[in-house]
Every structure is written in C-alpha cells, then in structure tokens.
Image (cartoon, rainbow, N blue to C red):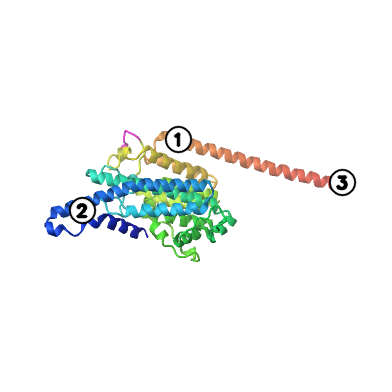
Amino acid sequence: MSVVLANNEISKMGTTSTGTSSSMGGITDAEGMNGGRKRRLRKMRYDSLEEIRSIYRRATKAFLLNHHRQVWHSLSLGLDRIHSLLLIPTAAVDPPSPTTTTPWWLVSSTLTGPSACVDWTIDLELHQLARKFHILRITFLTAILPNSGLVESLIGPSSSSLADSMELSASQQAALSGFLRLNAEPAKFLCRLLTAVGREEEQQQQPGPDAEPDGLLLPTADDLRQMHPSILTAMGLASIKLGERQTGKTLIERWFSAVESLDLCFVTQPLPPSRQHLHLSPRALSSDLRLSYQNLIQIYAIHILGPLDLWPFAIDFILSHQAADILPVETVQNIIHAIKTARAQQEQLVKHSKQRQQQRREEKKVRQGAVQQQ
C-alpha cells in the first residue's frame, strides 16, 4: 500500500515533467524540469511533516481518552504515510537505507551538497516520527492486551453506540486482530511486535485474523540494527508489564548482539585511543542518543536481569561497557551503584516476605493449639 502511495505522490508531482522537451530539443530543459520536479517533491515531503505530527497528536489524545480504535487508525495512518514518503526518491547522495551497514540513527547529516543535506534532514525527521509512532503502538497494545474483555470487543466489529466507534479498514482491523489474538501468548506477542517495527510494509500485508502465528520469526540482525535504542526500551517495559522478562531479555540481547559491530562510543572528549580510527566521533552520537542508550541498559540490567536473579551478570554487563569505551567511567559507576541499591532492596523485600510467612505459620499453629485445648 505504501508503495502505491509513493508512486501516486511522484506521478502527481511529476506530470508536468513529460512531453515538450523534444520540441525544445534540450537536455538542459529536461534537466531543469527534472530539478523542478525534485523541488516540488521536496516541498511536498517537508509540508507532510506537520500533517504527520498532527496525526501523532490525535493518536496520543485518543489513547488518553481510551478511544482504542481511533488510536489504532491514527497509528496505522501515520506509519503508512511515513513509509510512503521514505520511498520517494530524493537528491540525497547515498541516503541511508535498511540495506546499509550504518543505521539511520547513527548517520551524520553532513552529506555532500545542500540538496542532499535538506533531503536527509527530512528523512531523519521522518525516521524520528516513525520511532515515536512505534513506541506509542508498543505502549498501546501492551496496555490493552491483558484486558480480555476489551480484546474481544476490539477484535469484533465496532458498535455505533460506543464513543469509540471509529471504523477501521479491513487491513487495519486484520493487523490489530493479529496482535490481539496473541493475548494468551504474550511471548509470541512481543516477538511479533518487535518484528513489525523492522518490517512495516510486510506488517501492512499480514494474513487475515484467522492466520496461525506459530511461524513468527524474530527480527533479523539487519532489522535490529535499524532500531533506535528507545524502541528496545519500550519492548523491555512491555515485557515487564506482561510478566515476560525472559522474552524481553532475549529480544534486548539480540539487539545488543546486532549493534556490536557498530563500535558505539558515548565517551566524551578526549576520544579513547582505541576509538581514534572510527569515522563516527562522539560528537556525532548526540546526548539524546546517549540518554536513550543508558535508559535501555538500566532497564535491562536492573529491571529485567535483576528480577531474574542475574545480578552478577548485570554488573559484568555494565563493566564491559566501560572496558570497551562505550560509556564513560562515571556513568558506569552510577549504574552499578543503582544495580547494587536495587539488589539490596530486592533482598530486603524477600527477607521481609519470608519473615511474614514464618509469622503466619506460627500464628496458625497457635490457633490450632487453642482449638485443640478447647
């Protein structure tokens, strides 16, 4: 569907570029018309950004109001619109794509030529908007999945008597039902949810709601590399909410494995000697990206590995980031302190729980002894 939309956008913007170049006989005329067509496409893509932001605002408002079908309609509309705009050819020189080795969230915007820079800036904004839509979709689906009554009502047709009476298209309904029918299998739900982030176009073409989900595949390494760390943070939080920390651990570790070859470095100047040969400087890795990465490893180490009683592994994992010059020493020490604090709190809670259980057993024995004496 997105491919069709992209072709329609190109044909609408480019109809004036055909026909009369032969009468003028000039390659110059053809090139000029082609340049005008590219400028119109660029303007159309830029103007579409505010439209997509508006769709996102509608989705968040509907989420707060519990208008669930409206949320899904806006999410589907926004993601499909973004995908169609990213398919439109631009003037960018060697623009990043899912087939390149460097993901979009690590590519510098300093491309050759002003047109290429403008086009990539628009592409970057589209990717950032897609990231926000994906996080909202993960949050939305995870919030409603445990509610079996709500799930059944959303799988069925909408009712005009409800405030949330938004009519979904057949493809939107099929995609929503495909997720919600996995409410009894949260591990498979999480895998499908993450896979859909990397394969948005395929997600729009999912089989009908009666399709079996047993053949679900985990995201490929290429798909995972294109995912911003905040996507995995959202998945980690979703796994915690659904009581599937082991699945969250598996998915996050697959992402860490996929990005291992990217030589991430969030250490500020001076650049460590082991990193001086890299093309990506710490300046290219923004503070926002560093914060997103730190949030991910804290969720993973403290709230996933911890409750799985893998505290020593959590500390070793964080220390490996210091040894590899991925994170500065101060950040590593702060996270390790948070891990030790969380572990102490967990052990204290376990100790109190055992004490309460022992107290209840003793009280039960006392009551039984008093009954027997009577």
Q: Earlier in the sequence, mark 2 or mark 3?
A: 2
Q: Which of marks 3 and 1 is nearer the N terminus?
A: 1
Q: Which residue is drawn at 19% across and 53% down?
A: 33
Measure the C-alpha gap from mark 1 to mark 2: 56 Å
Return the x and y of residue 140 as percentages of the image width and height.
Answer: 50, 50
Magenta stretch: give its range: 268-272
Q: How crowded is mark 1: few (under 14 residues within 10 Å), some or many (20 or more)?
A: some
Q: What element carries label 1?
A: helix
When the figure is inspected, residue 296 is found, relative to residue 161, above or below; the finding is: above
Residue 333's label in the rendered image is 1
Name the amino acid type tagged 1: Gln
Q: Residue at x 24, y 51 (%)?
A: 38
Residue topped by disc 3: 373
Q: What element carries label 2?
A: helix
**In front of the other: 255 or 43:** 43
Quick check: can you spot residue 322?
no
Name the amino acid type tagged 2: Asn
Question: From this viewpoint, which residue is outermost toward the right?
Answer: 374
Residue 34's label in the rendered image is 2
